[in-house]
Each structure stands twice: as C-alpha cells, then as structure tokens.
Image (cartoon, rainbow, N blue to C red):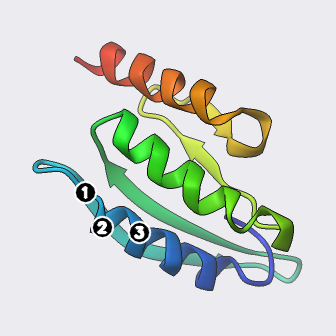
Amino acid sequence: MSGPEAARWAMELRAALAANAEPGDDVGPVEVQRSAEMAIAVIGLVFAGVGTAKTIWDWWNSRRAQGVTVTVLLGDGTRVEVSNLNDGQLEITFQQAETRER
C-alpha cells in the first residue's frame, strides 16, 4: 500500500488477514518505508489461495473510494494491482500462484 494513510490501511488489512488466516498461513508484521514523497506499507504473507484473495478483495473494495491501493507481490515475482482485477480474477490469480509454488 502506498500513500499518506498507508501504515493505517496496512494495519487494518493485516488485522483482517490475521482474523481470516487458515492453519499454516502466516501474516507478518507491517513494515513502513517512508520517503519525502510517499509512505509505503508492506505486509508479508504466507497464504493459502482463495480465502486470502477474498479477504484482500473485500477489504480493498470497501475502502477503494478513499483512494486505497493494494499491490500484491506473488512468490514468483508477479505484481498484482488489485484495482486492475475483479474479485473472481484475483481469486484465479491466487489459485494459479499457489499451484505454481507446489
């Protein structure tokens, strides 16, 4: 996440991810990097596919009018901009990533 509220938004999303985590999932702490122009918040995840995609989509969708952006960096290096997909596409992307990592 990036922007002036990045740290707050990341803490909210982290709480939602932790609350919905499956056994074996791991939600890391929020790390904030600041520059003169922008704050970027990062959450490290080890996750199990569709449930995580749904949690991220639902959280982002309820806040997108506030200008929240979410970028997901998958294990293979693929960057996914949540705003460029619908919920079904995000779930498929997470399923495909999970399959590749097996």
Say whether marks 2 and 1 touch (CB < 8 Å): yes
Residue at 62 percent of width and 77 percent of height: 9
| Residue 40 image point, x, y percent | 68, 70
Callout 1: helix, strand or loop? Answer: loop
Q: Please say if 18 is above or below 39.
A: above
Q: Please say if 54 is above or below 15.
A: above
Q: What amino acid is found at the position of numbered circle 2 in the picture? A: Ala
Cα separation, mark 1 vs mark 3, equals 9 Å
The disc at residue 33 is: none
Provide the residue designation for mark 2: 18
Q: Please say if 86 is above or below 9.
A: above
Residue at the right extreme, as displayed? 37
Provide the residue designation for mark 3: 16
Quarter of the image where one finds residue 70 = bottom right
| Residue 102 image point, x, y percent | 22, 17
- Answer left or right for 30 relative to 79: left
Badge 2 local density, few (<14 within 10 Å), some, or many (20+)? some
Residue at 25 percent of width and 57 percent of height: 21
Q: What amino acid is found at the position of numbered circle 1 in the picture? A: Ala
Say whether marks 2 and 3 touch (CB < 8 Å): yes
| Residue 31 image point, x, y percent | 49, 75
Q: What amino acid is found at the position of numbered circle 3 in the picture? A: Ala
Residue at the left extreme, as displayed? 23
Quarter of the image where one finds residue 62 = bottom right
Callout 3: helix, strand or loop? Answer: helix
Closer-to-camera residue (70/39): 70
